[in-house]
Amino acid sequence: MTSRSLSVALLIAVPLTLHAQRVSAQRVSAQRAPAAPADLIVTNARVYTADETHPLAEAFAVRGGRIVFVGSQREAAALKGAATRTVDAAGRTVIPGMVDAHAHFSGLAQTLSAVDLTGTHSYDEVVARVAERAKTTPKGTWIQGRGWDQNAWGDTRFPTHEKLSAATPDHPVILQRVDGHAVLANSTAMRLASVSAATKDPDGGKLQRDAQGAPTGVLIDNAQALIANKVPDATSAEWRSALKGAIAVMHRWGLTGMHDAGASRRMIDLYEQMAQANEMSLRLYVMISDDSAAIQHYMQIGPRAALYDGHVWVRAIKLYADGAMGSRGAALLEPYSDDPNNSGLLLTAPAHIRDVAERALRAGFQVNTHAIGDRGNRVVLDAYEAALKAVPTADHRFRVEHAQILNYDDVPRFAQLGVIPSMQASHQTSDMYWIGKRLGPTRLTGAYAWRSLLNSGVVIPNGSDFPVEQVNPLISFHAAIARQDANDWPAGGWLPEQRMTREEALRSITIWPAYAAFQERDMGSLSLGKYADFVVLDQDIMRVPPELVLKTNVIATYVAGNAVYERK
């Protein structure tokens, strides 16, 4: 070894050694000093901590909502007092509270009252579900739905409004596609929004039209606002009730935290009001929607972390580069293989992404930009690179949300720029049936390329993008390790060389989302001093065959050592 390489090795090794010594000293101090009794002891468990320094344990103790001991049952018992609660896990698996690194809080809340169109196998089925809702909805009242996907129908062309309009003549109807990047509206809704053949396509949006130029009812990406802005908003009380319902759904599936991928100032104010009133039993990392007034408002306040006893973080901004693959709005470097006159849509000017990124770097905010197509991803990486050149910043943790389709040349740029690819493994298993038609065979090597990115030196916080996908985080865990759907198809996995290991998959829903949100000192693993957020499972997802992972049930979900969900 040369003197130079020895020096580099020492520079790396010394901080790691000092960190290990501090951790060790902290453990010794915490375990040798006379300690007050724990509030809660979890025992007789197989605990996967997601902490590399102590990956497996059989017990842990909680005081004041934080972990004060992790180790053996015998040692944990020393912290038991007269008032200590004890949870006997009966040999079950315990993991850190799961965190969805990219989802839509208000979107999930809305779907709880909207017409559920997920799983429909034809346009006729969509129309039937909406017509059924119309029977119990006062005339003139808007009907909203979400979840249709023409790729799952026998006829995979976009639908047209005529059948829907005929079935719902007395109601304005707007139905969002499963990916949230297109809507289908009936004639009443289009009339109320003054959408006609004379309506021009907005920047970053497109109206599907018939041979005569009349709108067919499908509006893509930025064009959705032409009708969506006409839908009356819910009251604050209605929103509050719906958000509580969404929190309950998340806890049911073992989520103790989420990253809300785009929230308005009004919604953020409501989140804070709920947290102040102890109605936010969730670790909520908020991304501010791309609204100039809202961004300016929060930049003037500055980044805020762990508000209201660690329940709300406001320190990130959400931007959009392009659309989605399902609606052919994702921006590609070359045209779609099944639509040779279309290369997708850029929803935001690259200069805008760069400008917001520079301002964010100066103000201490993170920027997280939606990019799905290979051109969309390159545009974002180029904008980030230019911003970082103008405002050099260490540990900025900028993110690309989705990063689904990458050109081979752009894979190493994430690590080189310090950019985090925030991805959703369940998108791969939803899209694999038809993505080859969109891209052709040569571009598939950069599709959902988790292993290629991990090998380049980055981490991948995992999520669901709910309500685009289902809330259950184990769906993404299973997809990450198997690259198969719930029916174990295809045999061996789809492009299996891109799979994650189980250890990586666990980190992707625990400690990696925490890192991607600057939260790793407080959450993400069952480690000394961190929040006591954890989940009890009825199967060992780290050891059972992959085909059994999706049969795993959440027995209980705890936040700060308190049960927020228990299976009956």
Image (spheres, helix red, strand yellow):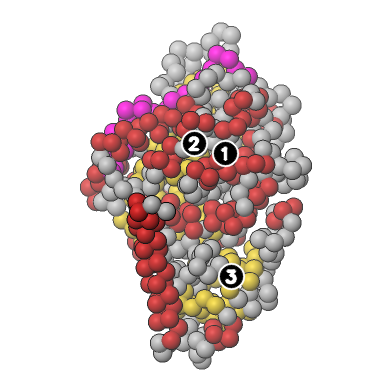
> Toward which corner of the image does residue 146 lie, by quadrant?
top right
Q: Residue furthest bottom?
A: 82
Q: Residue 337: image x %, image y %? A: 61, 19
Binning the other alpha carbons within 10 Å of mark 3 as few (below 14), some (14 to 19) or many (20 upward) gives: some
Which residue is the site of mark 2? Answer: 411
Instruction: Please name the amino acid that badge 1 sits on.
Output: Ala
Density class for disc 1 (Cα within 10 Å; few <14, some 14-19, many ≥20) is: many
Residue 320 is labelled as: none
- Would you name the residue on which mark 3 appears? 56
Amino acid at dot 2: Val
Q: Can I make out residue 317 in this image? A: yes
The CA span between labels 1 and 2 is 9 Å
Q: Residue furthest top?
A: 212
Locate residue 327, reporting x and y percent: 57, 27
Q: Earlier in the sequence, mark 1 or mark 3?
A: 3
Q: Name which of mark 1 and mark 2 comes first in the sequence.
A: 2
Q: Amino acid at mark 3?
A: Leu
Q: State which tag comes first along the sequence, 2 or 3.
A: 3
Q: Nearer the viewer, residue 1 or 383?
A: 1
* In-image side of 547 versus 33 (left or right): right
| Element type where label 3 sits in the image | strand
Q: Check the image and name the residue furthest to the left.
A: 300
Instruction: Please give the count of numbered marks on the rendered protein.
Output: 3
Kindly check if marks 1 and 2 are in contact, taking CB atoms under 8 A apart as contact: yes
Residue 351 lies in the magenta-colored region? yes
Name the residue rendered at 62%, 25% in the picture.
Answer: 442
In space, the residues marked 1 and 3 are separated at their CA atoms by: 29 Å
Magenta stretch: give its range: 338-361
Is residue 163 depicted above or below 522 in this figure? Answer: above
* In this picture, residue 136 sits left or right of residue 226: right
Query: What numbered label is drawn on residue 449?
Result: 1
